[in-house]
Image (tube, rainbow, N blue to C red):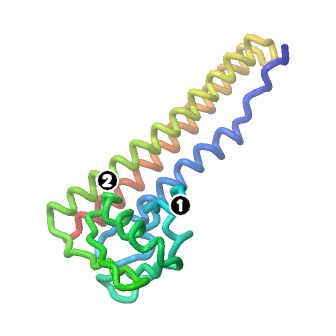
Amino acid sequence: MAQAPKPDIADIKRRMDGALDSFKKELAGLRTGRASANLLDPVMVESYGAKMPLNQVASVSAPEPRLITVTVWDKGNVKATEKAIREAGLGLNPTADGMMIRVPLPELNQERRKELSKVASKYAEAAKVVVRNVRRDGMEACKKAEKDKTITEDEHKKLGEQIQAATDDHVKKIDDALAAKDKEIMQV
């Protein structure tokens, strides 16, 4: 049986950074006051028997502060794209006009701001779960490496502390990004 390799702190941090980057991209997609093409980044379109990101079936632009336009490349995908935008949980009501879909952005009222804040919190919690899963994997790798005598008990303890420090750091960054986005969303 192969011995467990020594856990790689750099790889663990890289995986945690990936969760943080993904979370920041999701936050960028949450609308605050002005239209942004990034708003539709989380939209997945059922196309050709597979779910594809919106930007792989259409081009997205924001020609006006309160309007996003989606130009679908294949006429057969217009209905599916319109449906995907409507059901993405972003509170948008798209209308198809030939190959173009217009997505007017409603005025942000207090209720909608609270909804967006809840969505941001869900994104944050999902990112924290990913970070904690990476932490768990790292801790299990340490345990296994110590059991296989690849590392000593002291190395296990030191690696465990480094993994926990990286976890705490990434959770704090997620919380900070969420707090900043909440502040941005709630500004009237």
Q: In 3D space, how far apart are the residues under numbered discs 1 and 2 (Cα atoms)?
A: 22 Å
Instruction: Determine whether the residue tagged by mark 2 lies in a helix, strand or loop.
Output: helix
Q: Which amino acid type is marked by label 1?
A: Met
> Residue at coordinates 52% horizontally, 54% vertically from top-left?
22
> Camera-side residue: 181 or 86?
86
> Camera-side residue: 104 or 170?
104
Quadrant in which residue 144 is drawn: top right
**Which residue reaches farthest front?**
76
Q: Is residue 98 above or below residue 151?
A: below
Residue 29, image x, y percentages: 41, 65
Quadrant in which residue 89 is drawn: bottom left
> Residue at coordinates 51% horizontally, 75% vertically from top-left?
58
Q: Is residue 173 visible?
A: yes
Name the residue tied to disc 2. Answer: 119
What is the total number of numbered labels drawn onto the structure image? 2
Name the residue tied to disc 1. Answer: 52
Q: Which amino acid type is marked by label 2?
A: Val
Residue 103, image x, y percentages: 32, 77
In the rendered structure, the answer to whether residue 46 lies left or right of residue 16 reads left
Residue 31, image x, y percentages: 33, 69
**Which residue reaches farthest left?**
110
Mark 1: few, some, or many residues within 10 Å (few <14, many ≥20)?
some
In the rendered structure, the answer to whether residue 162 lies left or right of residue 78 reads right
